[in-house]
Amino acid sequence: MPSSFKKALESGKFVVTSEVAPPKGTNLEKMVHHIELLKDKVDAMNVTDHQSSVMRYPSLGGAILVKEMGGEPILQMTCRDRNRLALQADLLFASSRGINNVLCLTGDSVILGDHKEAKGVFDLDSSQLLSAIRRLEKGKDLGGNDLEGGVSFCAGAIVTPEANPIEPQLIKFEKKIEAGAEFIQTQAVYDLDNFKKFMEYARQFPVKILAGIILLTSAPMARFMNKNVAGVNVPQDLIDEMAAAPKGRALEKGIEIAGRMIKRVKEERMCDGVHIMAIGKEEVVPDIMAAAGLT
Amino acid sequence: MIRSITQQKPEEELDRLLEGLGRVFIVGCGTCTTLTNTGGGPQVEAMKETQTKKGKLITGSVILPVACDNISTVALAEFGQQIGLADVLLIMSCAFGVQTIARQIKKVVVPALDTLFIGKETGVGLFDEICSQCGACIIGETGGICPVTSCHKGLVNGPCGGTNDGMCEIDKQKDCAWTLIYNRLKDLNRLDAMRTLQKPRNHHGGEPRPGKLRIAAS
C-alpha cells in the first residue's frame, strides 16, 4: 500500500514536508512536542540522521515515534555510518514498522561532527542506496539473495540547486533519478528566480521536487550559512531585510520571509511543494505555514 | 616518483613510547623521510639533541640509504655494538622501514614518525595522496583521477553535496575530486563516463587484506 506521503505526491497537491531532529540522549520530550505540533499540518516529516555528523538518538527510532504518534515519517538515511549490510537491515526493519518513506543521503564527513576520529563508512553512496531500495523491492538483496517478505518504499534524495559548479551536481541528480528517486527535497533556496531556472531543467525528469526552505533567524545566521554551508546562498537583500528587523523581532521577520517565499513557490507553481527546515525552531513551522497562507 | 609520506609523532606520544628505555639508537632513512624532512640527517641530529636533553643516552645513530630494503640489516650489522648497548631503536623512517628492521633484528623498535600515505610530490614540499592501492582500479572511467583516494568519502558516482567552489567540505585547501574529474572528462569530451551509474565497490579488490601475491613461475 502506498504511503500517505506518496499519495500526497501523486495527488498533484502542493506538498509540505518539515523535519524533526532526534535529541542527544533519551529525553524525547521536545521531539514529541514537535511531532505533536506538526503531524496534522504537514504531509510528512523528515527525521534527521545524526545531522552534521553529531551522534544522536537514531533516525529510525525517531521515525517509529512519528509513526506511533500518528504522523507520517520520512526516514533520513545517510551512508556515513553503516555498510550495505546494516543499511539493508535497517530498511527491512523500517518496512516492518510501517515506515515506508526514505530520504537517501551520502552524509556529511565525520570530521565535521562530534566524533571526529570515527571511521566514515561510505560503503554505498546515495545513488547506490536508492538502487539498493529498488532491488529490495524486487525481493533481492545486494548480494543477490532472495528475501522472505517484501518491502515497498517511497524513496527520495536531495539536490543542491545553488551549487558551484552546478554541472557535476546535476549529473549526480540525474543518476539518483535513474537509481529510483521518486522525490527530491532540495538544499535551501533563497533566490527564487535562480530556482525557477533550475526547475526549467528539472521538470524534464519524472520526479517530484520540494523546494528547500530554511528559516532565517537573524542576519548573522544568514551570513554564517553563506560562509559555511555549501550550496546555500542568501542574497544580500534578504540579509539586509533581516538586519533591518527591530531588535527582538528577527525571528518574526524570518517567518515572514519564509512564508512569502513559500507563497510565491506555490502561486507560480514552481515545483511540487516545499520542505521547511526550521533547524531548532520547529515550533514556528505552523507560523511559517500560516504566513504562506497554507492553513 | 612516489614516496612514503610521514610526519613526526607528537612529542608526548614519543615520550610515552620511550618511557623506561634509557639507551637509544637512532635510525634515519636516506630516501623518503629525507625528502620529507622527517628522518634525514638534520632531523636525526635534532632528535639526538632532543632525546639527550630528556636524559636519554644516545648509543649511536645511522642514516640507512633505504630503510625498507632488506640490505638495511647488513648496514645495521656494522653498528652491532652500539645497537647491542641500546634498549630501543628509535626509527625515523616510514612504517615500511620500521617493519623491515623489526622483522630482522630482535630489539624493541619505536617509530618516531606516523606514516600518512603513499604520495606524489606535486610541488615544493607538497605531497598528494593519489592512489590507495585498492586493487580495483576505476580510473579508466574517471579521467585518470582516482575518486576512491582523492574524494574524502571515496564516492564513485559523483560529488556529495558538501563540495563548494570546487573544494572539499572537510578542508578548503583540498580539491573536490569530482570537480577535477568533471573538468577533465569535459575537456576530453567523455562526460558520459560520469553519467554511468556505478555499482557498489568491491572493497576487497583483487586481493583482500592483508595483501599477499605470488607471481606464478613462467
Image (spheres, grey):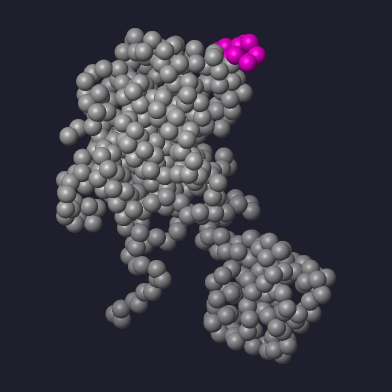
Residue B102, horizontal then vertical, whole percent: 57, 80
- Decide: is B52 above or below A10: below
> Which residue is depicted at the point 34% across and 76% down?
B215
User: Quadrant of residue A18 in the image?
Assistant: top left
Residue B180, horizontal then vertical, whole percent: 45, 41
Quadrant where the C terminus of chain A sits is: top left
- Residue A245 in magenta stretch: yes
Instruction: Give left or right: position of A69 versus A140.
Output: right
- Decide: is B12 above or below A276: below
- Which region of the structure is painted magenta? A237-249
> Which residue is depicted at the point 21% across and 20% down?
A11
Residue A67 visible to an observer of this rendering: yes
- Residue B205 in magenta stretch: no
Residue A226, horizontal then vertical, whole percent: 55, 26
> Which residue is depicted at the point 47% across and 48% down?
B152
Residue A84 visible to an observer of this rendering: no
Residue A120, horizontal then vertical, whole percent: 46, 51
User: Quadrant of residue B66 in the image?
Assistant: bottom right
Q: In the image shown, does B190 or A204 lie closer to the viewer?
A: A204
Instruction: Give left or right: position of A96 versus A104.
Output: left
